[in-house]
Image (cartoon, coloured by chain):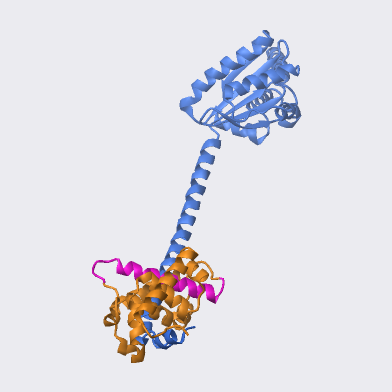
Chain colours: A blue, B orange
Amino acid sequence: MNNKFNKIFDNIKAEEIIKENTFSTLKKEIEKRNKTNKILIYRKFIVSIATFLLVFFISEFSYNSYFKAVAFVDIDVNPSVELIINRFDKVVDMHSYNEDGSAIVLNLNLKYKNYDEAIKILLDSINEKGYIKNYGLVSVTLQSKDKSKENIILTTLRKTVNTSIHAHNSNTNIEVYTVSNDVANHAHDLNISPAKYIAILELQKFDIKATIDNCKDNTISEIRELAIEHSKQHHEENEKVHSENHH
Amino acid sequence: MKTEQEAEKALEKYANTVRKICFMHLKKQHDVEDVFQDVFLKYVLYQKPFESDVHEKAWLIRVTINSCKDLLKSFFRSKVSSLNDVNVKDFSIDESEYNLLDMILRLPDNYKNTVYLFYYEGYSAVEIAKILNKNENTIYTWLSRAKKKLKEELVGDTFEQ
């Protein structure tokens, strides 16, 4: 380094007051920014939590809203299947009451389809497997939680079921009707379709030995035939007793 | 962001360097304080790590030169253009050096910085080019012209040994 330059510039030094003032300003600035950073981090954390909760509740609400059951359509041929329908008329779940029903449901993807389309596909599949017999019975029940839509769904169901069944078997008997929440709930508790439950209750009026367990594997047609048979027997016995009393 | 300790350490280490550069460019004491705060605040807020002390010092020199330049852009700020503009007595500079110092202070700003960095800080022309973000040839030209000016003014005297 040049000696003359050294002689000049070696003596030029920062004054203590300038250093102190500068350090004091830096200290305040560092403290202020650290505080701001902490607040920012805290705010970001709160916003993240709030956003998470909002998304969570919206998702939960949307999910629950979409998947909430509004109607239950039970189809009993012998495969016994239930479709659960949402407020948007879409199938959101399926349930089978017996092995034949399980076999049908396993191979079909009816979720998120409109219920009329789903029922058509279901009945076509049941028919292909030979379950729908000539002069057989197809029972379809509707339990609707939204009474304002009940008639619309019922009308659509009747139309769809009639069209689907009669396309293949013009002699098959079809019944489509609504059931109360009570009947549907009892049937669900017993793991049988509402139509079968009603049929068994009817049989039990004439045959005290008839139970849910010993009747549930029969078709609805068979249960009703039994009910008619027992009703005739019951009537004949009553007639006999009445006649004996007169003599 | 750097800590208080790092800020204090940097001030101790580089305050004199920053002051020397301010001495060459700024007339007023409060302008010097403004540049000090500007330079060291930038240092504290600088996120990237320095490769070495040499890198750190070169960075601070560049920021100081630029801060002085920015401050002097203002219409109301006036720069040092001769010995009359500085309080020499505050720095215990020998009177025998007043002539050379006056000549240095009369140089254009770019020449001032170049001769200071070359003759006092000991940087090469290549290193000065990096600090001032100029072409190497520009630095050689400035150095040559500065030396010529200083020699012209200091007839019979030398500043190089």
Q: From the viewer's perspective, is residue B157 above or below residue A41? A: below
Residue A97 picture quarter:
top right
Relative depth, front residue between A137 and B7: B7
Residue A20 located within the stretch drawn in magenta: no
x and y, in percent, of residue A135 in the image: 71, 10
Q: Residue at x 45, y 73 (%)?
A: B60
Q: Residue furthest left?
A: B76
Q: Which residues are magenta?
A: B51-77
B77 with respect to A220 (left or right): left
x and y, in percent, of residue B135 in the image: 48, 63
Q: Can see residue B53? A: yes
x and y, in percent, of residue B12 in the image: 45, 83
- Is the magenta region chiefly helix, strand or loop? helix
Residue B92 picture quarter:
bottom left
Q: Residue at x 48, y 67 (%)?
A: B129
Q: Residue at x 76, y 29 (%)?
A: A99
Q: Can see residue B92? A: no
Relative depth, front residue between A170 and A56: A56
x and y, in percent, of residue A208 in the image: 71, 27
Residue B31 picture quarter:
bottom left
Q: Residue furthest front?
A: B156
